[in-house]
C-alpha cells in the first residue's frame, strides 16, 4: 500500500513505544507504572517477604477504610496482575491510589529511619557523657515527626 499513510514504524504515542525504563527516560505505560508502584509498595509494606505476602499487604492497604484513596472493590487478583505486569490496562484512579500509597509509605519509612538515627545519636552522646536534655530531645522528636524516640518503635499510627 504505497502512499496509504500507514507506517510500519513506531509512533511517539503508540503503546508499543511505552516500554519499562527504570534507568532511562521516556514514557511508561500505565501497566508498567502500576507494576513498578505495586512492587515498590510491596517491598515497603512487607520487606523480605515472598510475593503472595507482598501482594496481600498492598491489597489490604489499598482497600483499607483508613486510606483516603481506597479502592474498596479491588480484587486481590487485580493487584497480582499489576505486580507481575499482566494487566491489560490500569485505570487512572488505580494509578493515583498506588502513587498516594507509595508516597505515604515512603514518608513513613523515612520518618522511622530518621527516628532510628536520632536514637543512635542520643545513645552515642549519652555514652560520651553528654546526654541530650529534654529541649534537644523534643527538637529531635519534631524532626522525626510525632514518633517515639524511646526506641520502642511506636508511631502515631496515621500512615494510612
Image (cartoon, rainbow, N blue to C red):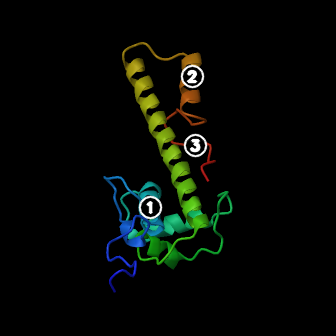
- CA gap, disc 3 to disc 2? 17 Å
Q: Nearer the viewer, residue 28 or 97?
A: 28
**Does 125 sit left or right of 100 as displayed?**
left
The quarter of the image holding the N terminus is: bottom left
Whether residue 50 is visible to the viewer of this picture, yes or no, is no
Q: Earlier in the sequence, mark 3 or mark 2?
A: 2
The residue at which mark 3 appears reads as: 155
Q: Which disc number belongs to residue 42?
A: 1
Q: Earlier in the sequence, mark 2 or mark 1?
A: 1
Question: Could you tell me which secondary element the residue under label 1 belongs to?
Answer: helix
Residue at the farthest front position: 3
Relative vertical location of residue 20 with respect to residue 152 in this rendering, above or below: below
- CA gap, disc 1 to disc 3? 20 Å
- CA gap, disc 2 to disc 1? 32 Å
**Does 122 sit left or right of 142 as displayed?**
left
Residue at the farthest top position: 130
Whether residue 19 is visible to the viewer of this picture, yes or no, is yes
Q: Which mark is nearer the camera, 1 or 3?
A: 1
Q: Nearer the viewer, residue 51 or 86?
A: 86
Q: Position of residue 63 (x, y in %)?
A: 62, 67
The residue at which mark 2 appears reads as: 139
Q: Are marks 1 and 3 in contact (CB under 8 Å)?
A: no
Amino acid at each position: 500500500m504505497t502512499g496509504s499513510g500507514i507506517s510500519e514504524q513506531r509512533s511517539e504515542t503508540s503503546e508499543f513505544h511505552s516500554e519499562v525504563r527504570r534507568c532511562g527516560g521516556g514514557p511508561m505505560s500505565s501497566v508498567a507504572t502500576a507494576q513498578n508502584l505495586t512492587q515498590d509498595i510491596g517491598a515497603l509494606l512487607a520487606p523480605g517477604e515472598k510475593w503472595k505476602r507482598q501482594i496481600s499487604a498492598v491489597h489490604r492497604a489499598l482497600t483499607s477504610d483508613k486510606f483516603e484513596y481506597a479502592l474498596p472493590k479491588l480484587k486481590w487478583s487485580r493487584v497480582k496482575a499489576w505486580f507481575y505486569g499482566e494487566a491489560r490496562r490500569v485505570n487512572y484512579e488505580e494509578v493515583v491510589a498506588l502513587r498516594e500509597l507509595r508516597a505515604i509509605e515512603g514518608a513513613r519509612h523515612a520518618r522511622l529511619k530518621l527516628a532510628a538515627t536520632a536514637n543512635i545519636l542520643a545513645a552515642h552522646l549519652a555514652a560520651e557523657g553528654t546526654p541530650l536534655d529534654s529541649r534537644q530531645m523534643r527538637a529531635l522528636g519534631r524532626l522525626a515527626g510525632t514518633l517515639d524516640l524511646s526506641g520502642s518503635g511506636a508511631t502515631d499510627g496515621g500512615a494510612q
